[in-house]
Amino acid sequence: MTVCFRGKKSTSKRSNKVKIDVYLEIIQTICQTQHHAQAIVFPGGYFFLDRHVGHLNYTERKQAIASSSIGSAINKGCSLLSASLRSPPMVIVGIDSAKKPRHGYTSDNGDQLCVAFHKTEIKGIGRKVFPDDYELYDYVTYADDFRRSDRIITLPDGRRAVLCACYDMFGIAESHNRATKRTRNIKYIGEGNDIIAATGEEGFAEVRARLVREWASMLKREKVSVGLAAIHQFDRPGLDKYWQRHGIGVASAALRGGLALGAAHFIERLPPHDKSTLAAVNVPRYHLNDGTFRRHYAIQPIHSMHVETSHGSALIRVYSS
């Protein structure tokens, strides 16, 4: 199940109050529909955390999120789901954060996280490791996020899913045998409070290549068959076509036909239920090599509904795979 919201991503803590109200209204609507989804995916940057957590380890990140007002609100929604549904779905939410002060080579322009909650417990955190073209020189990736399985979750039906913070969905197909500009966009690699490798330094390319190999090995080792992406935003429906072909479709192909789903903000208006679905399954392996000739392979929801909340409209869609 995905939830797309009309509006913009959150860029400050002030945004959270409105987004919390909307989140709880949407959860209440889902409880009333009694749809038994495996997961509910919200957009990237849906909430804003007022502290940087990229340099922290997984346990510390969990504590920082769980102890925030965001964590409390998400847990309240999880409790509502648990009370209404025999098998409550996981809740997947995109959370952006405050910047980290400049240290050494570059400032770290905030965290981009995809966080999974289930029955009021954080089950996984995926911090972005594949920057987009607009953040090459002010986004630090962290070595552990390429190789630790903290971003892999087990869905209620037993399938293994990778949590993708926005462009990480494109990165599902990256490996030492198939490295694209997604890998080349990685310019700074951190470990704790230190930058351990930076573009232009001797040996940087080797460190980056090793981490991408570890990323690909992790996805294979953990038997991942589902990709879930918290996508930030599109100005309007139709501008997501590149994402569908080269992000969602490629992810499904790389996962050997597995399910790839994303949820996003749409700033100007929401799409019709059957457009801009940001969903694919059973995409053939050869899609990886089709380049500019890639098809969309978009799948249709089996159920959808527009919801008018106290602060705007949302589109809820249910998919089967």
Image (cartoon, grey):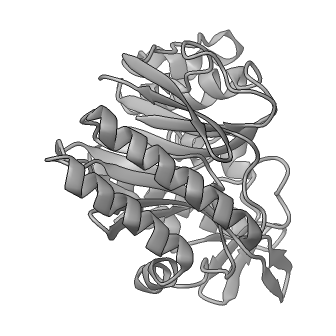
Location of residue 320 with respect to 73 vertically, above or below: above
Picture coordinates of residue 20, whole percent (x, y): 57, 61
Rendered-image quadrant of the C terminus: top left
Q: Which residue, as the protein is rendered here, is positioned at the far left?
A: 86
Of residue 320 and residue 23, the one placed in the foreground of this image is 23
Q: Residue at x 53, y 63 (%)?
A: 211
In the picture, measured across the screen, residue 28 lies left or right of residue 229, that is left
In the picture, measured across the screen, residue 183 lies left or right of residue 31, that is right
Q: Residue at x 51, y 13 (%)?
A: 297
Say how many tags the image has. Answer: 0
Q: Which residue, as the protein is rendered here, is positioned at the far front?
A: 310
Picture coordinates of residue 223, whole percent (x, y): 26, 45
Location of residue 111 with respect to 37 vertically, above or below: below
Rendered-image quadrant of the N terminus: top left
Q: Residue at x 28, y 41 (%)?
A: 38
In the picture, measured across the screen, residue 296 lies left or right of residue 319, that is right
Picture coordinates of residue 39, whole percent (x, y): 34, 44
Q: Is residue 114 visible?
A: yes
Location of residue 4 with respect to 217 vertically, above or below: above
Q: Is residue 216 visible?
A: no
Picture coordinates of residue 281, whole percent (x, y): 39, 21
Q: Residue at x 30, y 63 (%)?
A: 79
- Which quadrant of the structure image shows residue 129? bottom right
Of residue 221 and residue 77, the one placed in the foreground of this image is 77
